[in-house]
Image (cartoon, rainbow, N blue to C red):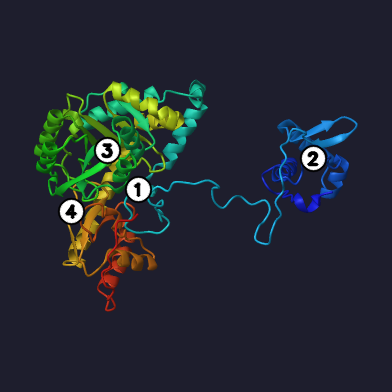
Amino acid sequence: MLPWKSIITLQKEAGCPVYLQIANAISLEIKKGHLGPGVKLPGTRQLSELLEVHRITVVRAYEELDAQGWIELRPSQGSFTSTKLPEISPRELNGKQRPHTFAAATGYELPVNAVIKNPATPNRHIPGFHDGPDPRLVPVNEIAKAFRSVLLKKVNLKYTSYVDTSGVTRFRNILSLYLNDTRGLQTTFENILITRGSTMGLYLLTRVLFNAGDAVVVGDTNYYYADRTFLSAGMELHRVPVDESGIDIDAIELLCKRRKINAVYITSHHHYPTTVTLCAPRRIRLLALAEQHGFVILEDDYDYDYHYLSSPILPLVSSDTRGMVVYIGTLSKTISPAMRTGYIIAPPNLILELARLRQIVDAQGDPILELALCDLFEDGTVKRLMKKALHEYRLRRDFLCENLATRFAGLIDFKVPDGGLAVWAKFDPSFPLPQLSERMKGQGFILPNGLIHNTGSTTLNATRMGFGFMTLEECGKALDVLEKIMKGPHWTIPLLETGPTR
């Protein structure tokens, strides 16, 4: 007889019911081959006394095992392991093996993704120059009220089931009106596919529109994760310079004369990572080139809503009459990064193809979230949030830039950004960012090390210094630490050669 008391270890405070713990332990012994076909199990009374549990608990465990096909309950005879089980030779445990442990690695060959590195650690619990919005500005009370309102309305019960893969029609209508009003578009709900953020949108587009070996033009330097999305699809990256007026259209035209270009990826407002805006004349030329050479313009407008000077230049898609531009946007920075809501704007035939692929990636989005966002748009919460956020982020931008200009002159080169949530800062080469970043972290503040921006042909000693994540007081403390480190007497670390990593 097996030592059941030591084999079945019960945790009565655990979330799993005791009878299931017993059933799982017995089925595990069967899987391991310690119990072969047709073996008689202890009686329910005997096992309940051994385990010090009520007999009904063991009865329920045996009934569960019987329902799953592991055992057979024979009237007047007892409980036996199923006679239909395959013969398994049990393996002896040696000193290095422990029972009931999950496999440390796959037992089959697993291909390793050479394009995408390990997931980055957000470190948002540490204050610093993070790139992104401040979660403390999120209108949590209004959001909670909107979710509650949606869930309490009986008419919305249907949205707890399966819905349109492209998104809730009501939300797409409201979003269409908002984009038409703020971006000069002429869309309807049929032009919109809702995604879980802009990154998902770009992933779907690469799989629908392109094949391995297709050529995509990107900036030098460019958004790291966009590059990885294209590379993971087997596409070829062709980098062109980015200057103070945006991506170099002359360079794109020369590329088009030499080979077939399938796509051009741009962040037309506040180019990532350098924050420059693509000027109007270049936008017109790029659109004309797309029509002439037949390539797709992927316009990633990730932070259009954050603009601090005059009204921003309208996106390329607002001038597109030939269907050459696909517009990718997000509400994750406008509302909250955790509320994963992005969108793709395109002609209906492309939206249909994207929805077909979406079905096998993620059957649908989050209809309850989408309905809550409808309420937040309609009751003015989004408009009030944007007004408040723009005012606060402009103060934070000005504070950071004034301090960089006065306290770090000659050490950090930068330009005041027209919009967005970060400053593109070029550090003096005698202060290698990876080491500087480590020293800052040791003092309790995050300074991005800039390695993620080394997507081009040259190694940069530059990074995006986010100003949105911290209050003015927090930013002041972070700058004090940065100044103390950079102007301290013990800065003697040599510049290290490092490649692009996350």
Q: Earlier in the sequence, mark 1 or mark 3?
A: 1
Q: Which residue is mark 2?
A: 57
Mark 4 secondary-structure assignment: loop
Residue identified by numbered label 4: 416
Q: Are marks 1 and 3 in contact (CB under 8 Å)?
A: no
| Residue 365 in view in this figure | no
Q: Which mark is residue 213?
A: 3
In the rendered structure, which amino acid carries the disc numbered 4? Val
Q: Amino acid at mark 1?
A: Val
Where disc 2 sits, the SS reads helix
Please name which of the two marks, 4 or 3, marks the residue nearer to the observer: 3
Reading the image, the residue beneath label 1 is 115
In primary-sequence order, the first of circles 2 and 4 is 2
**Residue 53 in view (yes/no):** yes
Q: Is residue 297 left or right of residue 500?
A: left
| Of labels 1 and 3, the one closer to you | 3
Instruction: Tell me the kind of residue under disc 2.
Output: Thr
Q: Quadrant of residue 259?
A: top left
Q: Bin the neighbour count of mark 3 within 10 Å (Cα to Cα): few under 14, some 14-19, many 20 and up.
A: few
* Residue at left offset 77%, top offset 34%: 82
Q: How many marks?
A: 4
Horizontal side of 414 relative to 339 (left or right) equals left
4 or 1: tag closer to the N-terminus? 1
Q: Is residue 144 left or right of residue 17?
A: left
Q: Amino acid at mark 3?
A: Gly
User: Mark 2 or mark 3: which is in front?
Assistant: 3
Q: Nearer the viewer's eye, disc 2 or disc 4? A: 2
Q: Is residue 474 above or below residue 430?
A: above
Position above or below: 476 against 397: below
